[in-house]
Each structure stands twice: as structure tokens, then as C-alpha cells.
């Protein structure tokens, strides 16, 4: 029995998920800790204690081969999390600290970049060299693979498609700018759209009785399934904006496929159908009907963990002699 495992860590604004991944790509244990501790070292101590507790609960003889970390604004080159608007720390050298504590290879990158690498190693992109992954969570993340390589960019912050501009005078974004794509296309974005539509239309809607904080993408999907006009129109509007921007992405990158994952992607046809329709309507003729828009091949619950762990798989591939 192979006793080596990889630890995959996904640092989110509220919760940090982690898991133990065996050599076959199975998540054999997963758990989480609270992200919102303002003291980074205390947060890291809590996380590391939880990792060891997980190993001991499965098999104390397991050996950590490496640790992959996906986090907002994590630089692949410096191993530092920089100016992430939803995290309580700025400029923290997470790779340095974890390498010192565990004495194994540690690789960190943007959480959506990690998802893209996970799609390449564990998902539906195993035989693809050129593809894009879009993560639709609280915000919109993205990862780009070109010629079989993850695109990091000069500083390690490439592929921020969530912050391309839809409308320069549009919705306020957490990055400080206005009209960013993620303010329209994300779990938060579609909720903002719902409340705009409720103000613009007088039609009856189940959504009128739900507060902004209580509303979820799952609820919007279920209400859309029941034929609610506002819920259905919110998906049409969201898919239109995403499709238009994906058409731009295709012109830049000429990918074989675009994979969409995250909470909003669980709406299925409600988000995929308008997205594909509007993307095709805005594509240059040479690209029409040649780029697939697909759900991720990673399980939605384990995708962030597998994505982070895949960074270590790639690390050893790159460092083979």
C-alpha cells in the first residue's frame, strides 16, 4: 500500500478547506478551519493541527509528499498571499512558513489556477493542451492553460478574468474599481441582479419575500425551475454577460474548451444555456461551434482540494530527472 499522500488546501474568505489525497487522486479525508483569524500564525497553527489530526484519524503512518495551496491572490513565484480583499491578512509568506513547519515541498497559486491544474490532472481536460477554467463562487476566478502549461504571468497574478470590465460606470467591486465581471457573474453578482430586477419589474415573484443575505444560488435555481419570471430573467442576464466575455476570451486564447465550476454552475441549464447562446452569438466566425463550454470534471465539493493537490503532482512532474 502506498503510504504517501498530498495535502490540498483551499483558502476561502470564510472557511479554509483541506483534504488528504492519495496517489490515485481520491480525497480520503477532508475538513475545514475558520479563515477569519486576524493573526495569520494562529490561523496557520490551527490549520496545521487539523491536518495532523486528519492524518492520525486515517492512518498515523501516512507520509506527506507535498502540500498544495490555492488562495486568492497567491503568487506562484513568491509563495505569498498578496492583498486579497476577502482575507484578513496582507502579504503573508504562506509557502515559507509551511515548508519550515512540514519540511516538504509546498506550492501556492491563485485558487482558480489550482482548479485549472486539477482539471488537467484529475478532470475532463486530461488530454487537452489549451483550455480555460472559470470558477463561479462568491466572486469569479479563472485559470488558463496554454500549450499544456498553466499561465502565471510576470508577477504570478495572470488570469484575473473576474476583473475585466463589463461597464466602467457599473457596479462597485471589492477591488476598488467599477463594473468588473464578477460583480455581475458570481453568486453575489446574480443576487445583485435579482434585486435590480425586483425594482424594475412589478410581476409577482417568490424572491420578493427573501432578504439579500438569506438568498442563495440554490434557492434562485429552485425558484427558476418553478417558472418564476424574475429568477429566470436573472439567469438570462447573467449568462448574457458571461457569454459575451467568454467570446472575448476565445479571441484572446483560442481554447479547446471552457470549464465552469463552483456554486453558480450547479444551476445547470439555467446558466449554461444562455452562456453558450450568447457566447456563440458574439464569436468571430472562425471560432463558432468549435469551443465547448462544459461543467467541470471535478466533484464540486472536492474540486478545490483536488485542484490544490494537483499543484504538487505537477511540481514533481516538472522536477523529474
Image (cartoon, rainbow, N blue to C red):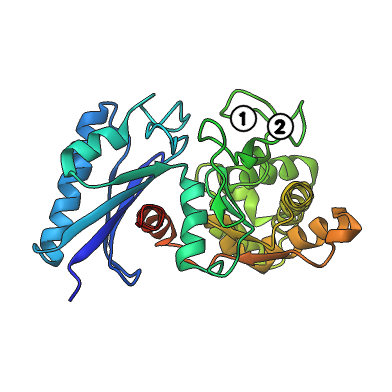
Q: Residue furthest right?
A: 285
Q: Is residue 121 left or right of residue 174?
A: left
Is residue 299 in sight in this rendering? no
Residue 276 in view here? yes
Where is residue 217? Give x, y as percent.
57, 55
Mark 2 and mark 1 in contact (Cβ < 8 Å)?
yes
Q: CA distance from mark 1 to mark 2?
A: 7 Å
| Quarter assignment of residue 229 | bottom right
Rendered position, 113 above or below 296: above
**Residue at the image position 29 percent from the left and 26 percent from the top:** 38
Mark 1 Cα-neighbour bin, 10 Å: few <14, some 14–19, many ≥20: some
Mark closer to the chain start, 1 or 2:
1
Q: Which secondary structure, mark 2? A: loop
> Mark 1 = which residue?
173
Which residue is at the front of the view, 187 or 27?
27
Q: Quadrant of residue 109?
A: top left
Q: Would you call the spot at circle 2 few (<14 residues within 10 Å), some (14-19), or many (20 or more)?
A: some
Q: Which residue is mark 2?
A: 179
Image location of residue 161, percent across then percent down? 64, 41
| Residue 9 against residue 97 in the figure, above or below | below
Left or right: 291 in relation to 1: right
SS for dot 1: loop
In screen coordinates, is 42 left or right of 93?
A: left
Q: Position of residue 175 (x, y in %)?
A: 57, 27
Q: Residue furthest front?
A: 321
The front one of 134 and 131 is 131
Amino acid at each position: 500500500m502506498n503510504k504517501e499522500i498530498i495535502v490540498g488546501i483551499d483558502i476561502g474568505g470564510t472557511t479554509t478547506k483541506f483534504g488528504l489525497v492519495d496517489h490515485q487522486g481520491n480525497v480520503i479525508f477532508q475538513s475545514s478551519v475558520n479563515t477569519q483569524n486576524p493573526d495569520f500564525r494562529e490561523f496557520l497553527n490551527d490549520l496545521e493541527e487539523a491536518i495532523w489530526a486528519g492524518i492520525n484519524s486515517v492512518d498515523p503512518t501516512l507520509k506527506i509528499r507535498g502540500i498544495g495551496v490555492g488562495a486568492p491572490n497567491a503568487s506562484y513565484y513568491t509563495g505569498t498571499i498578496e492583498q486579497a480583499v476577502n482575507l484578513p491578512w496582507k502579504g503573508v509568506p504562506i509557502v515559507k512558513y509551511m515548508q519550515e513547519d512540514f519540511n516538504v515541498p509546498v506550492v501556492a497559486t491563485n485558487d482558480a489556477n489550482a482548479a485549472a491544474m486539477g482539471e488537467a490532472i484529475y478532470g475532463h481536460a486530461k488530454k487537452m493542451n489549451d483550455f480555460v477554467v472559470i470558477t463561479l463562487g462568491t466572486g469569479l476566478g479563472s485559470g488558463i492553460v496554454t500549450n499544456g502549461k498553466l499561465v502565471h504571468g510576470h508577477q504570478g497574478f495572470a488570469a484575473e478574468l473576474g476583473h475585466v470590465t463589463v461597464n466602467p460606470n457599473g457596479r462597485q467591486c471589492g477591488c476598488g474599481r467599477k463594473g468588473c465581471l464578477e460583480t455581475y457573474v458570481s453568486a453575489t453578482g446574480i443576487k445583485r441582479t435579482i434585486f435590480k430586477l425586483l425594482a424594475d419589474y412589478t410581476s409577482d415573484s417568490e424572491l420578493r419575500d427573501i432578504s439579500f443575505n438569506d438568498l442563495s444560488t440554490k434557492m434562485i435555481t429552485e425558484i427558476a425551475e418553478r417558472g418564476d419570471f424574475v429568477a429566470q430573467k436573472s439567469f438570462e442576464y447573467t449568462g448574457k454577460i458571461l457569454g459575451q466575455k467568454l467570446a472575448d476570451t476565445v479571441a484572446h486564447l483560442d481554447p479547446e474548451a471552457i470549464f465552469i465550476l463552483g456554486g453558480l454552475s450547479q444551476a445547470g441549464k439555467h446558466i449554461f444555456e444562455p452562456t453558450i447562446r450568447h457566447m456563440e452569438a458574439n464569436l468571430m466566425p472562425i471560432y463558432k461551434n468549435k469551443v465547448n463550454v462544459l461543467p467541470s470534471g471535478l466533484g464540486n465539493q472536492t474540486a478545490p482540494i483536488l485542484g490544490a493537490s494537483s499543484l504538487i503532482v505537477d511540481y514533481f512532474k516538472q522536477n523529474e530527472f
